[in-house]
Amino acid sequence: MRLKLRNQLVGLLAFVGSLLYWGCEENSLPEPRDGAPIVVLSAELDGMSFSHSAGLDSVVAETEVVDNQDLRLWKFSMIDQRQRHFGRIDLYIRNHQVPFEDPFPDLQQTVEMDSFNYAFLLPPIDADPFQTKRVEVVLTTIGGVVYESILLPQQQSFFNIESTQSLVREGRQYLLTGLQFDCQLVNADSLDTLRLRSLQANLLFGGI
Amino acid sequence: MLEPGSDIDKHFKDGFEGQGDLRGLEANWEVVQAGLPKAVLGSVLLGKLIHGKIAGVSLSTLSVVTAVTLTVFSTSETPPDIYEPLGNGNAELSAAQVFSDEYFEAQAQAETRNWLATSSVAVSDVQAIVLPTETPVQATLASRASKTPIRINHRFRLLQSKPFVGLPNVYRDDCPIMPLGWNYSFLEDENGFAEVPPHVVRQIDSAVLASMPPAPNFKNRLLARWEVSFIGGATWGKGFSNLSTEEGNWELSPLIGVGLDYNINTRLGIIGEVHYLRRNGNRLRTSTTEEQFFLRREEVTRQVTIQSLEYLHLPISARYRLNNLHSFTGGMFTSILLNTSSERLDVVESNDGYQEANLGSKKGYMHGLNRVSLGLTLGYELQASRRVAFGARMNQGLNDLTQESMSLENGVNSTDLQRDYQVYVRLKLY
């Protein structure tokens, strides 16, 4: 009887122990942490300064990669969905060489610091079009009027990438890029020009 | 105290003389005298005191007959706790009728060299661990020489100090044998036979002991008071909700556990139990919201809706047995929260709209819940057989299961006192 009782007490302890062990599993929701916009853009447009952040005031950002034969364009867009402040700003960056098969190293090699000395310049007629990295800025106004940088010689313009940081979001790879540039934009129909000065931005490229 | 040469001696003589066989008795006295110490014999002849002892063995649930021994003692007045056997012998228990687990009658006949004794006993509460203090024993003691019985009907006090206390520690054919013994003393005075207080018998025939089941020791007595049982059943209760749009549901949940009973006596006992208890049907929601920025602003709401609460449920109750079938329990319980089962949902609201991601069932979310709850329990049990009982029980909590933070979902501080009903089967393991 004593042996029987001992066995049953052992069984009882095992039962209670397993329940308590099972009860040790505890879970909790992560503490909420409010973030700040990471995609921001500020500049002066014809002497009027503005600043926009993706996520605030109906402004959102988009990234896209456009493969076109031997060219690969990395595109960033900032869009005012309610068209209250502007229409949209698109920025295209192109590598100077045949793109890598693996896109992200290609993006890293394209968006590289201090490698855009002649970004806005049209290449000489006899030059290899792939020898220079290229940037194009397209601004669309609230009324839908399009201004582009590629149609102008861009005297006194510059373009510089100051920082890059790899990010992964929902399984996609991005490159957060800190840059600044000055450039001139023109409407192809009316030949009206706009001067975009002191543009400083943190933009995202990639999403692949 | 009686004076020498008085009542019992006279009673004996009168009885024997009535049968006209006094010479035979006298002859027998001589035989007895030859084999016994003078002091002992003297006390018998003086008729001051006769101590009788019948050590009987019977059963609780089967009419199995076992050996019965009669030892007739006689003694002198001093010292009062020393008794010598006048004679002893073995006999078979003539019958043991079992009427139920709680009542049986047994008759025993035993004889010694000089005395023939029959006795019967009716014992109630056989199932009890400890025999009642007073059990009516009817005994007939007769001299073998005279063949004339002297009938003694009296209520004798059982001597609890001896080992013949009913304990089901011996089994035969898987049925417990209830060793049952009774000692009695009788004394004649002017008003008849009077009860003698419990006393110590110094000597018991070794053959008697050898023929009997081993006497339970103190530890075995304690063990015999304990019962271990398995409990399985279901809990029915209404779940809690802190949502304004949904209520908790009435749902069945499993109940499983073990119980440990301690029988204080035939009626009262204490039951301690350890249960795994699950309470389903809850809609207890907590959520956190954070603002995230990337390509756009996203408001991420992480939502946990607790549906099941799992407890280590520890009731401790007093049991009162109304009779062989029905018993009532009442006591308190402590519930220790072990785990929960929850539905996890992430809701992302962004400039592009509303998106839900159901992350399925998750365990371990216990935020906003009290880890320990206390309450009262009240129940009833029906003993269906020796091992199986069916029970029903109500649990009423005394403190909230949820903390105040859990009640903020609908802006109302609710009172979440648990109340559930249980039905279960108790299977006695031993």
Image (cartoon, rainbow, N blue to C red):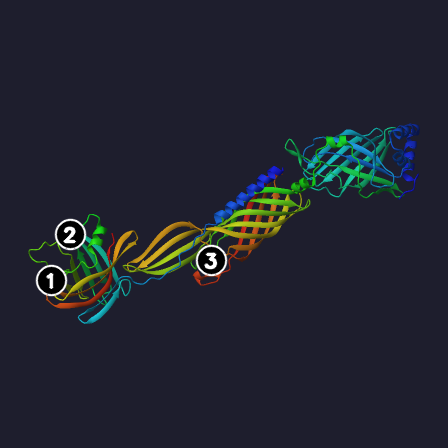
Helix, strand or loop status at disc 2:
loop
Q: Amino acid at mark 1?
A: Leu
In front: label 1 or label 3: 1
Q: Nearer the viewer, residue B389 or A169?
A: A169
Figure quadrant of residue A125 = bottom left
Figure quadrant of residue B150 = top right
Helix, strand or loop status at disc 3:
loop
Left or right of residue B38: residue A56: left
Quadrant that contains the C terminus of chain B: top right
Helix, strand or loop status at disc 1:
loop
Q: Amino acid at mark 3?
A: Gly
- What residue would you read off at disc 1? A151
Is B307 drawn above or below residue A191 in the view shown? above
Label of residue B429 in the image? none
Left or right of residue B223: residue B75: right
Figure quadrant of residue B87 = top right
The residue shown at (32%, 63%) is: A36
**Chain letter behind tag 3:** B
- What residue would you read off at disc 3? B368
- What residue would you read off at disc 2? A97
**Pointer 3 with pointer 2, Cβ within 8 A:** no
Quadrant that contains the N terminus of chain B: top right
Residue B135's x, y, as percent? Answer: 76, 41
**Chain letter behind tag 2:** A
Residue B13's x, y, as percent? Answer: 92, 34
Q: In the displayed orientation, state which residue is furthest to the bottom.
A: A47
